[in-house]
Each structure stands twice: as C-alpha cells, then as structure tokens.
Amino acid sequence: MKALNEYINKITAITKRTELGEISWQKGSQTTFSWRTTGINDENAVISVQKSRSRIRLGGIVKDRIVYIFQIVLQPKETLVNLSSIEYTNTPLPDVLERLYNAAEYSADKRSIDLFDSILKKNKF
C-alpha cells in the first residue's frame, strides 16, 4: 500500500490526541473500541481499533499472536480503511496500532471511572 506511511502518521496523531484526552473512545466489546466523528462534508464516520488473537503453526509449534485491526467506516456501512497488523508485520504499523489500542482502552476506562466517580459523589460515598 503506497499510502501506508500517511496512515501511520495520521493514526499516530489520533493516538497522541487520545493520550491528551482530546478524543474519547467507547468500548464496543471486550476487544473493540470506537470513536464516532464526522468528516469534512459532515459524513458520519466510526473509527475503530480491535485486538484479536490468531494461532499460527511454525513447524510443529503452535503460537498465539496478537492482531490489531484499524477501520474507518462511513455510515451507514462503507468501509474506507481496513488495516491489519498481520498484513504489515515488517512495518511500524503493528506497534502504531498497539499504541492506539492501548490509548483507546485507557480512554474508555477513564470515561467509565469518571462516570462511576460522579455517581458516587452524587450519592455521597
């Protein structure tokens, strides 16, 4: 993919904004986080990052490996970008996606903790 470096740069920028608390992610499942946003033409988009495990057989040895998937989907269901760390193992993409995943996971957890704190404060705990 010719544009891979551009995607890496943009994913890195999203990660930095997430780490600064400027982007709030939602937990879609145990291993998927999404951010709903709009494009230049007010197109609704969902950006997601997912972590999964796959098994590979190397000779007689079976190994688990972690796979990160990054997607941009225009609503209702047009997939613009679908990047997988498994397809680009010899590039910086796997590390970039892992960092984004960790930042998105923390963002979703922080949002839950903040809500929980507000509930406790309201109920004078």
Image (cartoon, rainbow, N blue to C red):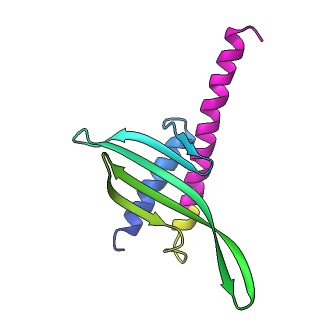
**Along the line of sight, the residue nearer the viewer: 43 or 62:** 62
Please provide percent x and percent y for residue 74: 31, 49
Q: What count of labels does the image hold?
A: 0
Q: Residue furthest toward the right?
A: 125
**Residue drawn at (63%, 33%) of the image:** 110
**Residue drawn at (36%, 52%) of the image:** 73
**Along the line of sight, the residue nearer the viewer: 72 or 13:** 72
Q: Is residue 86 left or right of residue 56?
A: left
The stretch of residues the image draws in magenta is 96-125
Above or below, 22 relative to 121: below
Q: Is residue 116 magenta?
A: yes
Q: Residue furthest toward the left?
A: 41
Please provide percent x and percent y for residue 118: 65, 17
| Screen quadrant of the N terminus | bottom left
**Residue drawn at (58%, 46%) of the image:** 29
Above or below, 100 relative to 8: above
Please provide percent x and percent y for residue 106: 63, 42
Q: Quadrant of residue 113?
A: top right
Please provide percent x and percent y for residue 55: 66, 74
Q: Residue furthest toward the bottom?
A: 59
**Residue drawn at (48%, 45%) of the image:** 34
Q: Is residue 25 left or right of residue 118?
A: left
Q: Main secondary structure of the magenta part?
A: helix
**Along the line of sight, the residue nearer the viewer: 45 or 41:** 45
Q: Is residue 74 left or right of residue 108?
A: left
| Screen quadrant of the C terminus | top right
Q: Is residue 46 magenta?
A: no
